[in-house]
Amino acid sequence: MKKKSGSLGNVLKKDMKRYWQAYLMVLPVVVFYLLFSYKPMYGILIAFKDYSPAAGVWGSPWVGRHGMQNFIDFFGSYYFRRILKNTVVLSLSSLVFGFPAPIILALLLNEVKNERFKRVTQTISYLPHFISLVVICGMIKMFVANTGIITQFLGLFGFQPTNLLGKSQYFPAIYVLSNIWAGMGWDSILYLSALSGIDQDLYESARIDGAGRWQQTIHVTLPGISATIIIMLLMRLGSLMNVGYEKIILLYNEGIYETADVISTFVYRYGLLNGQWGYSVAVGLFNSVINFIIILFFNRLSRKLADVSLW
């Protein structure tokens, strides 16, 4: 056993000596993740403690019931079902409607033959990605206000003009559709790159066999980018429960907490605004564990069914 470890050490030493430039390039990345990703992980202890900034992580006392009281309080709270439901609804809605959107856009742009029109369309679709989130949320508020362009447009179909962000039932649709509008163009770049890598001889063979454009899309295009789609889907599933709190905080108000309040905004309010550090970290840890379980399950399922996985 010692002999094996010694030989492995010698091989590693020789490899580092031979390719020292590559190891030197990787070193800043390793240091970054060690300092900012792995070292702070000891902070999850706060979830099991009655944390006080003055006492620090190690000096703060453990909470009751063997350190699980914060979790018990959260699971038994009035808000647990509401924020879990809202998080799942917004996450799944964004996944179901938002994930296919850039794929569809990329497929449509791939069919456009007029290069000038294609470039202009791509540029217009990319623009929202470069606009500040604060500005985006300000635009959304204007669009859905009483006199906003979207509200006025809906009024043509008999909809009573009102501030849509003042009605809780409209928030999920506003959140999901605005996400699609803001990110669809930028996200389509990866799929356009994948489309450019498909062997054109496959299309020629399909045409010879009498396949139309739709059949070529089904039997050539989609299989050609299926690995990219699966990898992006897995990455999306890995953060399924992480509904971005920044956008929601910029959009919501107390009148729409019923559908807008999610786990991340709940953690923000209780942790930073109310100072309940241990409680908020427990909620965040619960969210991270759920995400971890989801990505493990679907990565294994993808490896078994499609032979494509993240690891």
Image (spheres, grey):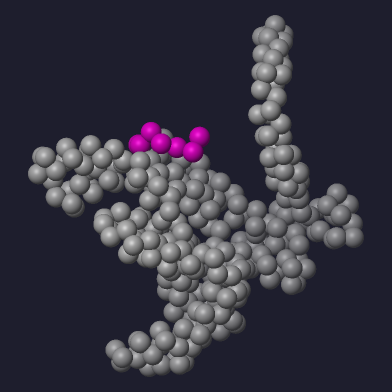
Q: Is residue 286 magenta?
A: no
**Which span is picked out in magenta?**
305-311
Counting labels gives 0
- Residue 218 vertical placement versus 16 (above, below): below
- Residue 206 is situated, as x and y percent measured from the top left of the image, at 16, 41
Confirm whether the magenta stretch covers residue 308.
Answer: yes
Rendering coords of residue 225 (x, y %): 34, 44
Front position in the image: 279 or 23: 23
Does 275 sit left or right of 146 as displayed? Answer: right
User: Residue shown at 46%/63% (left/top)?
Assistant: 126
Frontmost residue, 283 versus 192:
192
Q: Is residue 172 visible?
A: no
Query: Which residue, as the protein is rendered here, is positioned at the far top?
Result: 3
User: Which residue is rendered at x = 70% and y = 69% of the image?
Assistant: 270
In x, y percent, where is residue 236? 48, 52
Camera sees residue 265 = yes
Residue 1 to residue 62: above or below:
above
Q: Is residue 77 left or right of residue 175?
A: right
Residue sitting at x 56%, y 80%: 138
